[in-house]
Amino acid sequence: MDTQERLKLKKRYEELPDAALLDMIAEGQGAYSPGAFELLLEEKEKRGIAEGQLVEPPAPSQGGEDEGSFEKSPSQQYVALAVIVEYKDYEYVDALLRKADFLYSFEKLSLTGADFPVSLIVEEQAVKKALKLLEGFKPSGGMVFW
């Protein structure tokens, strides 16, 4: 790996949430090109993350004033609106929607227990409102709207 590629990977790893960093390390050295895995381990050590330590994303939120748990009522329909793959995008979307007057939630999609990607779930009648709130948002990672 040349110096430029090493610096690029190092910067990318610095921007990863702790959970994503640990997920990548869990894949093992064989999943990476020579030198890349060592950079992951260096970043883990730099952050002081202990073996097995994981920083969980915040609990699912409910829009509006009431910060109670998100419960789906049988009379309401819910829609998976988007898939969010980056923690900082999740934080931004959650902050935007906290001001909303409709219910929403995030549900993990990983079968391996990874924190990301997550699905953004909103009330069916609030889809247009949610899209309006998210208008102009430029995800740093990836985000797919249905």
Image (cartoon, rainbow, N blue to C red):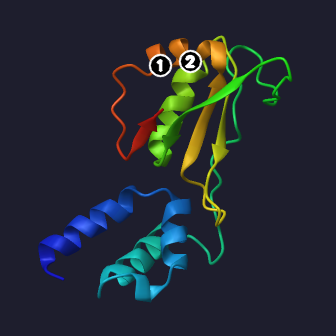
Q: Is residue 115 left or right of residue 77?
A: left
- Amino acid at the residue labelled 2: Val
Query: What residue lies at 38% left-to-right and 19% top-to-bottom?
Result: 135
Query: What residue lies at 65% left-to-right and 19% top-to-bottom?
Result: 124
Q: Percent from the top left, x then y, of residue 26? A: 55, 78
Query: Total marks drawn?
Result: 2
In whole angstroms, how far apart are the C-alphas of marks 1 and 2? 6 Å
Question: Which of the pair 14/139 is nearer the observer?
Answer: 139
In this figure, which residue is indicated by the disc labeled 2? 127
**Cβ–Cβ under 8 Å for marks 1 and 2:** yes
Q: Percent from the top left, x then y, of residue 73? A: 85, 23
Tell me if residue 120 can be seen: yes
Q: Percent from the top left, x then y, of residue 47? A: 48, 66
Rendered image quadrant of residue 31: bottom left
In this figure, which residue is indicated by the disc labeled 1? 131
How crowded is the residue under tag 2: few (<14 C-alpha within 10 Å), some, or many (20+)? some
Query: What residue lies at 58% left-to-right and 46% top-to-bottom?
Result: 118
